[in-house]
Image (cartoon, rainbow, N blue to C red):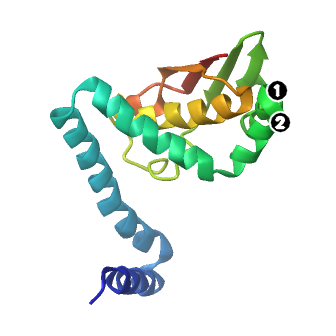
Amino acid sequence: MRRKTFLGALGAGAVANAAQEGASAGVERQRRPFQVWIANLVDNLDSKLDPESRRAVMESCGRACARRSSVAQAAQGGVDGLVAVLAKHLGAENASRHGGTVRLRYTKCYCPLVADGPERLSGTWCECSRGWVLELFQAAAGKPVEVELLSSIKRGDPNCDFVVRL
């Protein structure tokens, strides 16, 4: 059986089970193995790669995700246009520009892969989000920028806070 066929059948089976046993129980069973896999991946990155390599791998993943994002079009409107679009999603108090600095605050995890769990992850995972922000702001600014991740929900902080230096 081809992998695609197998995974499709696996998904169909999970949907059927969810219908029989209740949607929330079925969704939880589907999510749990994926959460364990993500946590294992991050643990392996942390134990097998040096910090710079971990950062580069996860940043690259985040940049690729940003290029596919619906927000990527907003980068064509320049930095102020991008900040305005992010402010609509995050709230005006959570996306602002002050001269050559942009501040972003996420009050929840927006990563579709881990927003629902695992609850805590190594900071390695959040380099992906830093890469996402980096890609969008470099495209908007038309030049290299720096992005610093100050805090992260997945590391146990109350918010994800980013500083973008243009």
Q: Quadrant of residue 88?
A: top right
Left or right relative to 4: residue 81: right
Say which residue label 2 marks. Answer: 77
Say which residue label 1 marks. Answer: 80
Q: Residue at x 39, y 62 (%)?
A: 31
Q: Residue at x 44, y 69 (%)?
A: 27
Q: In which quarter of the image is residue 106?
A: top right
Q: Which of marks 1 and 2 is in front?
A: 2
In the image, is residue 24 above or below residue 84? below
Label ID, residue 51: none
Q: Quadrant of the N terminus?
A: bottom left
Nearer to the camera, 102 or 94: 102
Can residue 84 be seen here? no
Callout 2: helix, strand or loop?
Answer: helix
Residue 165 on image: x %, y %: 63, 14
Q: Which residue is drawn at 50% across and 22% down?
A: 149
- Contact (CB < 8 A) between labels 1 and 2? yes
Callout 1: helix, strand or loop?
Answer: helix
